[in-house]
Image (cartoon, rainbow, N blue to C red):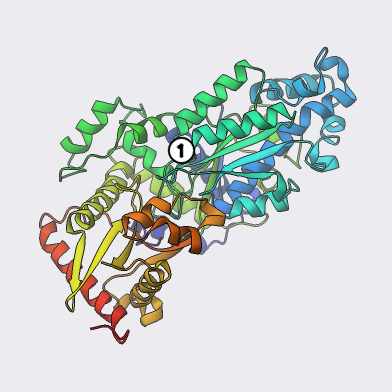
Amino acid sequence: MNSDTLMVANLAYMATILYNPNNVAYEASTATTPMEIEAGKDMATMLGFDPEQSWGHITTDGTIANYEGLWMARNLKSFPPAVKKIRPDFVPGLDDWQIMNMSTTQVLDLIGKVKEAGCFDEVRNESARGVGAGDGCLGVVLVPQSKHYSWVKAADVLGIGNKNLIQVQVNDHYHMDIDTLKSIIDDHIARKIPIMAVMAVVGTTEEGAIDEVDRIAELRAEYEKQGINFYFHIDAAYGGYSRALFLDEQNRFMEYGEVKERLSADGIFIHETEYPQREIYEAYKAIPAADSITIDPHKMGYIPYSAGGITIKDRRILDLISYFAAYVFESGEDSPTLLGSYIMEGSKAGATAAAVWATHRLIPLNVTGYGRIIGRSIEGAQMLSNALTTTKYITVNDRKFQVETLAGKPDFNIVCMAFNEVGNTDLDSMNALNEKIYNESSYVSGPVYKNDWITSKTALAREDYGDAPRNFVKRLGVPTAEWDRVGSVYVLRVCLLNPFVSHNVHFDVLWDQLLAILKEKLAAAIAGDGKC
């Protein structure tokens, strides 16, 4: 997951690094701290939040952004019990279960009431911020099995505990299974265990999968009617910027048919491409239902490292994490001078903020700007997936090999695949073959940039994904009994980040060249294995 970066971002970064601004000290970053806040607003607007109510900023990476999302969810969940302890008259008639199931908006409204009474600091000191997360009493956090490993770390660092991080089974397309999610929520409700937060992924880093955000949002709304509420965070570190593909020049989320028409009429897609499928469209449309969203400019924003980001729907929540003043936006101040008081990081480079800000000024966060770049990247992945599916079999040295993509057409711009020799039914042997192909297609075989075909890899193991990979293994000619025995499949992973591949009008010639390279890799992988 690496690519060339945008020249405007590089120039802005290099120009700013000469002044070495530190964005948590406004005196040393009078230009770049406002740039960071403005860039955060840009991202919030692209993701569908109201720019007058929302907030965002640049983090080191998606891991820190995920930490901040869970940090806010934890403090939000623990605030109403603290209010009940200090000022029970503010929550009259609510039992403990109702207190633990107040909605995000209700809790944020309660903050205002507590402020007016002059006891905000006293109450906040009785929340998780002051007394800790407290032996699971705040409930559980539900994440898909496809989550980034930073969520496991976040549960540890923030005192939630990994026993309270529940992983929800994914389906054959590596989306969080909604029926399983509902079942888990219902089970915890029956046992009077609160749901602290639910997290969805838009662009998993392993498969590029996009969870059904719309269905999760609908499920949340149904529970809200029953008096059950939880925080909703989306980890869109990888896929967040691609929401630009669906926005017109007025930041309006276009109708489905309009998106399809613009992608063709504007020359973003120049081949027969089915993308976006309706379910992908609906997932992106529902993104504003989240309370906070992780989004990384240094991924699909094509910005130099390190530039993660987080956006928040209602900036009042910052009061629950601030260490500077309880009223960071009380006077209407848009850019508090002490940024470090309400983010997780300390000293941070202003050059990063300048790079993101300058790029957003030059490249619109809509279909005419980032949509054009990212759309071409997505089309490249669609074309590679189609070519692999059409080719199906590759013959090398009189031996026939089958290739399968992981989940059919990719949701985004990652194509996962595996090879197996026709007739082989041993999963260990298939895994060994794909590991050898990876070795020939990575730094293992020598200098990376001398290699014509570079891949990354991953292992989809039962302990992480349940039996979701079983059908994939079966499609490669390996019986399910082998999956049951081994419980892990080695997968090659290609990120199509280059926006120029799809606009090669002679893609058939390009594919023939890639196919020849693949045959070379296969030949090298099977050399010396003793078979004729």
Residue 469 horizontal/vertical position (percent)? 43, 53
Residue 223 horizontal/vertical position (percent)? 60, 22
Query: What is the secondary structure assignment of the residue under circle 1?
Result: helix
| Viewer can see residue 441 | yes
The image quarter in which residue 388 lies: bottom left
Name the side, left or right, on which 400 lies relative to 490: left
Q: Which residue is mark 1?
A: 42
Question: Front-most of 449 and 194?
Answer: 194
Residue at 32%, 84% (x, y): give it.
529
Residue 19 horizontal/vertical position (percent)? 54, 61
Question: Front-most of 379 and 218?
Answer: 218
251 lies above or below 495:
above
Name the side, left or right, on which 154 lies relative to 508: right
Question: Front-most of 372 and 408?
Answer: 408
The image quarter in which residue 278 lies: top left
The image quarter in which residue 102 lies: top right
| Viewer can see residue 8 | no
Name the side, left or right, on which 287 lies relative to 110: left
Residue furthest to the top: 93
Residue at 57%, 58% (x, y): give it.
349
- How many residues crowd mark 1 within 10 Å: few (<14), some (14–19), many (20+)? many
